């Protein structure tokens, strides 16, 4: 199983931090929304009855903790309006930074600006994720396999949509050249969703067992760009674009390492999924734990605010 790469790098401690722990500032403003911490509940679910309850839990926690939240693909709700209520989460999170979500490949299958606006309006989102998942689609017999000519279509969405457009992967990372091209056509930020978290190749193997095709899916078990390495690559893009770290982050220390590598937010999925299955309070406790871990790392490294993080706080990056 491929790793995120975070275990290969270490934060450099500051033995005498000239700081008061209680005055460390973990807040930031993004897309005109004030966040208490650079934490994102990554895109997971929606479109089903159970997904509606789950999204409600996540939205309530995002609101209480002052963090950002993305939802799973809204394609099902675009095609069946009755499912749109499962994404109606703004009423639970009136102040949270919310990301709508559609598959970019759908722009080759009849979707356009109208569908993107519907996705945004569905949850009164502050921004739209267009996700890229070519390998996942290729491994699905029912997948959409035509990814040709998407860049100019993404550009048109960026030009026409009234909210920012971000592009994310689903677990294999976004290469330097693609990220650069996306930013050049108007994409407001990149969520790497790198390798080291959920392997969707293995998920597809379990979702649709087929002895003839399982070997193909298994061949891609360690596919992708490890999250930490992907962040290191994208920090070389000129202009310091918005980069979101997701894909296998384990705790607030991984989040701190991500920030030092140039990320603005760190996204967590599986950790929050497990907590939400226990209950809303457990989910909130998990978010607060990650925030405290990150704040402790800031204190121990002599960092008083998020803007101070940089690569000089890391050692071992040559091992990525």
Image: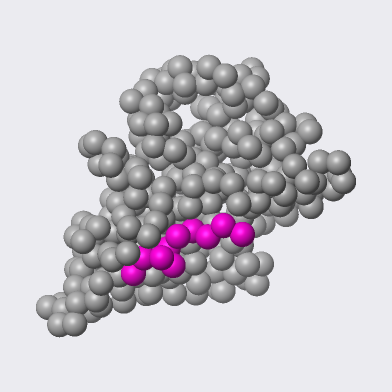
Taking depth in this image into account, of 55 and 75 the one nearest to the observer is: 75
Q: Residue 169, position in %: x, y? A: 52, 41
Instruction: Give the farthest residue toward the bottom.
Output: 16
Identify the residue at image location x=45%, y=17%.
152
73 to the left or right of 34: right
User: Can see residue 57?
Assistant: no
In this picture, is 185 found above or below 251? above
Instruction: Give the farthest residue toward the left.
Output: 18
Residue 217, quarter of the rendered image:
top right
In this picture, is 267 found above or below 170? below
Q: Residue 157, position in %: x, y? A: 45, 22
Residue range in magenta is: 1-10
Taking depth in this image into account, of 143 and 284 the one nearest to the observer is: 143
In the picture, which quadrant includes the C terminus? bottom left
In the picture, which quadrant includes the N terminus? bottom right
Identify the residue at image location x=59%, y=47%.
223
**Which coloring applies here?**
one colour
Q: Residue 206, position in %: x, y? A: 79, 52
204 to the left or right of 96: right
Does the magenta segment cover residue 105? no
Q: Residue 131, position in %: x, y? A: 54, 36
Looking at the magenta stretch, what is its main secondary structure?
A: loop
Identify the residue at image location x=57%, y=19%.
148
Taking depth in this image into account, of 42 and 181 the one nearest to the observer is: 181
């Amino acid at each position: 199983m491929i790793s995120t790469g975070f275990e290969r790098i270490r934060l450099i401690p500051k033995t005498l931090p000239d700081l008061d722990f209680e005055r460390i500032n973990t807040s930031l403003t993004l897309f005109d929304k004030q966040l208490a911490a650079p934490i994102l509940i990554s895109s997971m679910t929606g479109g089903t009855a159970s997904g509606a309850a789950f999204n409600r839990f996540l939205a309530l926690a995002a609101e209480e903790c002052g963090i950002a939240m993305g939802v799973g693909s809204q394609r099902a709700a675009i095609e069946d309006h009755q499912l749109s209520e499962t994404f109606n989460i703004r009423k639970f999170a009136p102040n949270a930074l919310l990301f709508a979500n559609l598959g970019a490949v759908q722009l080759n299958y009849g979707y356009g600006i109208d569908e993107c606006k519907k996705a945004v309006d569905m949850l009164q989102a502050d921004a739209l994720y267009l996700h890229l998942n070519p390998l996942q689609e290729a491994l699905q017999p029912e997948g959409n396999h035509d990814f040709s000519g998407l860049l100019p279509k993404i550009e048109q969405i960026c030009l026409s949509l009234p909210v920012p457009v971000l592009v994310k992967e689903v677990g294999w990372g976004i290469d330097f050249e693609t990220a650069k091209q996306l930013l050049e056509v108007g994409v407001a930020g990149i969520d790497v969703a790198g390798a080291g978290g959920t392997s969707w190749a293995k998920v597809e193997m379990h979702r649709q067992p087929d002895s003839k095709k399982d070997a193909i899916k298994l061949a891609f078990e360690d596919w992708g760009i490890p999250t930490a390495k992907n962040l290191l690559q994208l920090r070389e893009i000129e202009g310091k674009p918005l980069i979101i770290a997701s894909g296998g982050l384990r705790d607030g220390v991984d989040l701190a390492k991500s920030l030092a590598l140039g990320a603005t937010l760190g996204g967590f999925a599986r950790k929050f999924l497990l907590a939400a299955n226990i209950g809303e309070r457990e989910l909130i406790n998990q978010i607060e734990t990650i925030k405290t871990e990150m704040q402790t790392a800031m204190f121990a490294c002599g960092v008083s605010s998020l803007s101070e993080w940089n690569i000089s706080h890391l050692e071992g990056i040559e091992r990525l």
